[in-house]
Image (tube, rainbow, N blue to C red):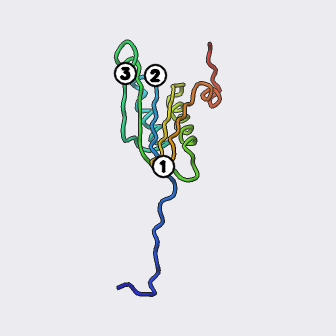
Amino acid sequence: MTSPLAPIRLRLAGTGNYYRVEASVSRLLPRELPHVIAAYTSSWTKPEEVERVAIGNESGEALVLTLSADRELPTTERPSDVAKRLSYAIWQALDRYVKVTIETTYLGESPDAHFEFGESQYSTAFGARFEA
């Protein structure tokens, strides 16, 4: 039996929201895969699923890499913050532009969000220019 004077302890629910973040990175060289995985891990969390697909005429010429994992997003962050941070981390790890597409899925009741950071965002972030 519990003492009537014993303190009442409440366990508060975790703050934030649980999200699945899926990143697709295209036109990678096979040697760049570990760098992308490391950038994803440091910016989000260790990927739970990793899928790679060869593209181009010759197998292994270029790859599309898709990584996904679930994690709690702090209430101070938005999915767009995660997408931007992740895209920039991948570009910085590779030291070049690659197409990065981020899908964030709230594992609750709100709608999903789609973010794509392209050449103009890369140019702004890293001062690069693309020739036409």
Residue drawn at point x = 44 percent, y = 43 percent: 20
Q: CA distance from mark 1 to mark 3?
A: 35 Å
Residue drawn at point x = 51 percent, y = 30 percent: 100
| Mark 2 or mark 3: whose residue is earlier in sequence | 2
| Residue 125, x across and y down, in percent | 63, 31
| Residue 115, x across and y down, in percent | 54, 34
Of circles 1 and 2, which is in front? 1
| Mark 1 or mark 2: whose residue is earlier in sequence | 2
| Residue 116, x across and y down, in percent | 55, 31
Which kind of residue does numbered mark 1 sit on?
Glu
Which mark is on residue 27? 2
For label 1, the residue is 109
Q: CA distance from mark 1 to mark 2?
A: 34 Å
Residue drawn at point x = 46 percent, y = 34 percent: 23
Q: Secondary structure at mark 1?
A: loop
* Quadrant of the drawing holding the N terminus: bottom left
Which kind of residue does numbered mark 3 sit on?
Ala
| Mark 1 or mark 3: whose residue is earlier in sequence | 3
Which mark is on residue 54? 3
Residue 47 falls in which quadrant of the image?
A: top left
